[in-house]
Amino acid sequence: DLYFKVRVIDLPTGAGPLPVIDDLTISVADGNVELDWSYSTVCDSYKIYKSTDPFDFTDAEIAVTSTNSYSELVTNVNYFYRVTAIRN
């Protein structure tokens, strides 16, 4: 069985904090972990973090994307994901 825990945060940048991504969904399909979200606030990109510790995402950035989704292969390790919006 695969279990995911989502912890939503905001990341202050630019003129102030951006609203949190509050609709992150995580699913598994065709051997991939798929993260999807919508976001109505204008931002430049999203940072994706992955950690085995749900409270420590230090040095855990794995990707930057300009789209509202991310996917990677499923592994046998339980991971926690965090997505933050970035305004340059």
Image: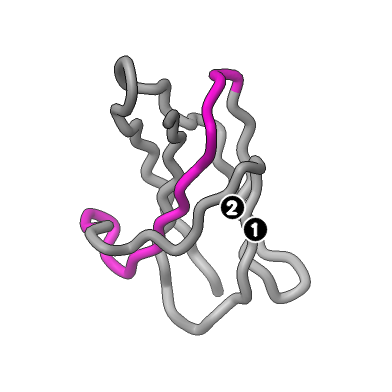
Of 68 and 35, the residue lying toward us: 68
Which mark, by number, is residue 26? 2
Where in the figure is residue 46, as x and y percent of width and height?
A: 50, 42
Q: Check residue 65 in the rendering and tell me which mark sits there, or answer none.
A: none
Residue 49, magenta (yes or no): yes
Query: In this rendering, is residue 52 above or below 25?
Result: below
In this rendering, the answer to whether 41 lies above or below 31 is above
Color theme of the render: one colour
**Which residue in the protein does label 1 denote?**
34
Q: Tell me what residue is drawn at x 59 percent, y 27 percent.
A: 39
Which amino acid is tagged 1? Glu
In this rendering, would 4 be left or right of 38? left
* Residue, far front: 88
- Asked if the residue at tag 1 contacts the one at tag 2, i.e. Cβ–Cβ closer than 8 Å, the answer is yes
Q: From the top left corner, tell me how far across and down residue 65 is, in percent.
A: 58, 49
- As measured in the structure, the alpha-carbon distance from the residue carrying label 2 to the one carrying label 1 is 6 Å
Q: Determine the residue located farthest toward the bottom in the rendered image.
A: 76
Magenta span of residues: 40-56
Badge 1 element: strand
Mark 1: give few (<14), some (14-19) or many (20+) Cα within 10 Å: some
Q: Residue furthest top?
A: 15
Q: Is residue 45 left or right of residue 31?
A: left
The N terminus lies in which quarter of the figure?
Answer: bottom right
Q: Quadrant of the C terminus?
A: top left
Quadrant of the image occupied by residue 62:
bottom left
The residue lying at 23 percent from left, 59 percent from top is 58
Q: Check disc 2 and give the amino acid type.
A: Ile
